[in-house]
Image (spheres, grey):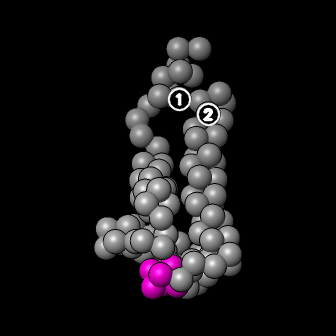
Amino acid sequence: MGTQLSALLDGDIPGVGEALGLVAGFDESLVHGLARLDEDRTAALATVADTVASTPLGELVAEAVGTVATGSVADEQLAVLAGVRGALLGAVHDALLARLDDALG
């Protein structure tokens, strides 16, 4: 059991901190309102778009971020942004679950 616990807690999981940082920046933009984005919050959303650019969501996210950055917010853009946030958190979940599976053997 001690070995399993040690394996479970053995260092940071690659990518998890970065993904959670992206979600935190995204959430910060939501707290202040997508209709009132300043440069920092627009940059946070652009970083999310850049991160997922090579994924199937990439083009949709880039378009949604571009539209929201201009001050236009519609249901379609909100759905895409919610989807990418969910995808990032899903990736964190998968990484944590993989660490648990490895620890438990």
Quadrant hosting residue 77: bottom right
In the image, what residue type sits under mark 1?
A: Leu
**Could you say where residue 17 lies in the image, as x and y percent from the top left?**
42, 48
Q: Quadrant of the C terminus?
A: top right
Circle 2: element type: helix
In the image, what residue type sits under mark 2?
A: Leu
* Distance between the alpha carbons at the discs numbered 1 and 2: 6 Å
Circle 1: element type: helix
Kindly report the secondary structure that dominates the magenta region of the rendered protein: helix
**Residue situated in front as seen by the camera: 11 or 69:** 69
**Residue situated in front as seen by the camera: 22 or 29:** 29
Identify the residue at image location x=68%, y=78%.
Answer: 76
Q: In the rendered image, which residue does mark 1 sit on?
A: 8
Q: Residues within 10 Å of mark 1 (few under 14, many from 20)?
A: some
Residue 26 in sight in this render = no
**Could you say where residue 20 lies in the image, as x and y percent from the top left?**
47, 51
Q: Residues within 10 Å of mark 2 (few under 14, many from 20)?
A: some
Q: In the rendered image, which residue does mark 2 sit on?
A: 100
